[in-house]
Amino acid sequence: METISKILVSSHSGWRWIVLILLLLAVVQMHAGWRGKKEFTAGSKKLALFAMVAFHIQFLFGWILYFVSEKVQFVPGMMKVESLRFFSVEHSLMMTMAMIFITMGYAKSKRKETDVLKFRTVAIFYTIALLLVLVAIPWPFREALGGKWF
């Protein structure tokens, strides 16, 4: 079980870079399309879709880890321990919210009639999700959480 956990942690840590790059590219392109009143092309839709799918894969890795990682513990006093509270509650809650925003943004954009509204919808929902993700990552400068760059 320990080997599986290590593989999942490595996958989850490495895949985050793909998610962040795709999400950032989608946010930039959607804002540019919205502000520039551009055409919502098949490429625009694919980028939004790939960012959503990549995030869903990451989310799946994360939820499996939630049940097998020693970083998630529900023990007396866990809310007073920053790392336990972060991984058991804060990280999982913010990432769940981000996943909901991404999924809603993509789904709602498909029902919009104009290209500007499609870009605006994805831009707003994905930007909120990106901000949640950036706050919820255990970055290396947050020493108490034991984050690593890779």
Image: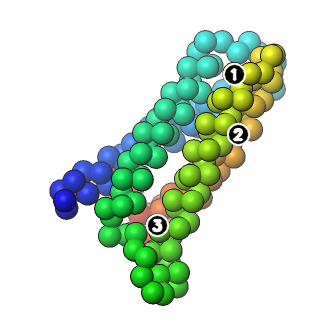
Using a 10 Å C-alpha cutoff, classify the residue at mark 1 as few (fewer than 14 neighbours), some (14 to 19) or many (20 or more): some
Q: CA distance from mark 2 to mark 3?
A: 24 Å
- The first of marks 1 and 3 along the sequence is 3
Query: Tag 1 or tag 2, which sits nearer the N-term?
Result: 1
Q: Amino acid at mark 2?
A: Phe
* Depth order, front residue of 63/37: 63
- Quadrant in which residue 44 is drawn: top right
Q: Earlier in the sequence, mark 2 or mark 3?
A: 3
Q: Is residue 7 above or below residue 2?
A: above
Q: Which residue is depicted at the point 36% across and 53% down?
A: 64
Which quadrant holds residue 93? bottom right
Instruction: Name the residue carrying label 2.
Output: 125
Helix, strand or loop at label 2? It is helix
Label 1 and label 3: CA atoms lie apart by: 34 Å
- Residue at mark 3: 87
Crowdedness near tag 3: few (<14), some (14–19) or many (≥20) residues, C-alpha within 10 Å: many
Q: Nearer the viewer, residue 74 or 148?
A: 74
In the rendered view, tell whether residue 86 sits above or below residue 26: below
Q: Amino acid at mark 1?
A: Lys
Q: CA distance from mark 2 to mark 1?
A: 13 Å
| Residue designated by label 1 | 110
Displayed quadrant of residue 117? top right
> How dense is the environment of label 2, judged by Cα within 10 Å: few (below 14), some, or many (20 and up)?
many
Q: Nearer the viewer, mark 2 or mark 1?
A: 1
The x and y percentages for residue 150 are 35, 52
- At numbered mark 3, what does the secondary structure look like: helix, strand or loop? helix
Q: Is residue 141 left or right of residue 24?
A: left
Q: Which numbered disc, 1 or 3, marks the residue closer to the eye?
A: 1
Q: Quadrant of the N terminus?
A: bottom left
Confirm or deny contact between disc 2 and disc 3 (CB under 8 A). no
The percent coordinates of residue 71 (x first, y second) are: 37, 69
Name which residue type carries label 3. Answer: Phe
